Amino acid sequence: MAVPDFLVHVAKRLDQESDRATTFLDPATTRRPLLRIVEAECIGSHVSTLLDRGFAGMLTANRLSDLNRLYGLLRSVGALDQLRDAFGVFIEATGGTIVLDEKNDPHMVDSLLKFKEQLDDILKTSFERNDELAYTMKQSFESFINKRKNKPAEMIAKFFDEKLRSGTR
């Protein structure tokens, strides 16, 4: 089963279990402990598998609703640290690919700006502007930008110089 499908399945099961607990058990005392157990079994025991198998693909495909579902489920089991680490690894790998590809130099800044815009949208829409994930994004950008000495800085300076010159004409 694909990770997005699994996330939908787990969300449905959690809703069903919540409805059952409300209907048949005392909602004030039993519902929350029961849901914690179901969350731990359905999500908590599969966190690394979810992140290893489907997280990068969902980020690349910009699957905002699936990423939001993953974020909510991982938050419910206290696994945001693992999400943060996987997010940082993805950003460094993808950004590093952009920066280290010398054939892409003429389009490096455009690619970086598109990548940053995509990540900003994911952070805002799917990750509810989580401060820790925003900080991880900032740190990851700093890390991959510095993988190639002065070239990214040079390309950014040329990009802005070109934009400023074309704006005065």
Image (spheres, helix red, strand yellow):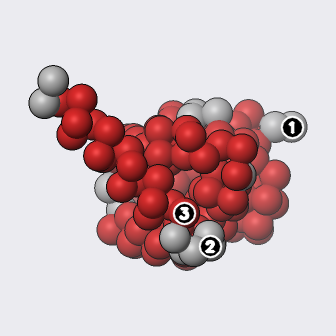
Residue 97, given in percent of the width and then of the height, sits at 70, 54
Amino acid residing under circle 1: Met
* Label 1 Cα neighbours within 10 Å, binned few <14 / some 14-19 / many ≥20: few
Q: What residue type is labelled 3?
A: Lys
Question: Where is mark 2, residue-wise?
Answer: 147
How far is mark 3 from mark 2, CA to CA?
Answer: 10 Å
Task: Say which of marks 3 and 2 sits in front.
Answer: 3
Q: Residue at x 55, y 46 (%)?
A: 108
The residue furthest left is 168
Find residue 151 and name its label: 3
The N terminus, quarter of image? top right
Q: What element carries label 3?
A: helix
Residue 46 image-quadrant placement: bottom right
The answer to whether residue 80 shows anywhere in this view is no
Q: Is residue 11 left or right of residue 119?
A: right
Mark 3 neighbour class, 10 Å CA radius: few under 14, some 14 to 19, many 20 or more: some
Kindly give the residue lying farthest to the top in the view shown: 169
Mark 2: give few (<14), some (14-19) or many (20+) Cα within 10 Å.
some
Q: Which residue: 76% across, 66% down?
A: 48
Q: Which one is closest to the eye, mark 1 or mark 2?
A: 2
Taking the spot 22% from the left edge, 36% from the top edge, the residue there is 165
Between residue 157 and residue 147, name the one nearer to us: 157
Mark toward the start of the polypeptide (3 vs 1): 1
Residue 2 in the image, given as x and y percentages of width and height: 81, 37
Tell me if residue 93 comes above or below residue 80 in the rendering. Answer: above
Q: Which amino acid does label 2 sit on?
A: Lys
- Quadrant of the drawing holding the C terminus: top left
Q: Name the residue under label 1.
A: 1
Which label sits on residue 120?
Answer: none
Q: Which residue is drawn at 39% across and 49% down?
A: 158
